[in-house]
Amino acid sequence: MALRQLTSEERDSARKKALAARIARAEIKRDFAAGKLSFGDVMGKADADEAIARLKCTELLESLPGVGRVTATKICEELGISINRRLGGLGVKQRAALATHLAELG
């Protein structure tokens, strides 16, 4: 099944929406890494905003100083969280485990 062709107005609208989502995710990662937002704050924003809910857990962890791709992957594996899981898809127990782990980190 072929996708229908979008009009130039629809493409522009989609482009602006995608840009706004990328900017929102970048701001969340920057503020989380700087300590301006706690994990609970980030999860609250993820519950309210679809763009934030689509942020991968590993990307959020990688935004922290000293945490790279390997460390973020290890953290997720230890907590039983898929490396492809997005913030909006975290269950209650996964959120609690991740919050506890982040509190232990510092």
Image (tube, helix red, strand yellow):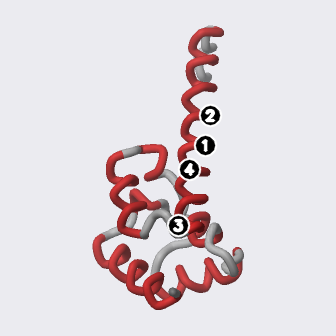
Kindly check if marks 4 and 1 are in contact, taking CB atoms under 8 A apart as contact: yes
45 lies above or below 72: above
Front: mark 4 or 3: 4
95 lies above or below 46: below
Residue 89 location, x and y as percent?
39, 60
- Farthest left residue in view: 92
Q: Residue beneath label 2, please?
A: 19
Q: Residues within 10 Å of mark 3 (few under 14, many from 20)?
A: many
Instruction: Say what amino acid the circle numbered 1 marks.
Output: Arg
Instruction: Say what amino acid the circle numbered 2 marks.
Output: Leu
Residue 39 location, x and y as percent?
42, 69
Q: Nearer the N terminus, badge 4 or badge 3?
A: 4
Residue 87 location, x and y as percent?
44, 61
Q: Residue beneath label 3, please?
A: 57
Front: mark 1 or 3: 1
Residue 101 location, x and y as percent?
45, 86
When asked about the image quadrant of residue 17, the answer is top right
Kindly check if marks 2 and 1 are in contact, taking CB atoms under 8 A apart as contact: yes
Alpha carbon distance from label 4 to label 1: 5 Å
Residue drawn at point x = 67 percent, y = 76 percent: 65
Residue drawn at point x = 33 percent, y = 79 percent: 96
Q: Residue beneath label 1, please?
A: 22
Dot 3 falls on a residue whose secondary structure is helix
User: Toward the viewer: 69 or 83?
Assistant: 69
Front: mark 2 or 3: 2
Instruction: Say what amino acid the circle numbered 3 marks.
Output: Cys
Q: Residues within 10 Å of mark 4 (few under 14, many from 20)?
A: many
Q: Nearer the N terminus, badge 1 or badge 3?
A: 1
Residue drawn at point x = 39 percent, y = 54 percent: 46
Q: Tag on residue 25?
A: 4
Instruction: Say what amino acid the circle numbered 4 marks.
Output: Arg
Dot 1 falls on a residue whose secondary structure is helix
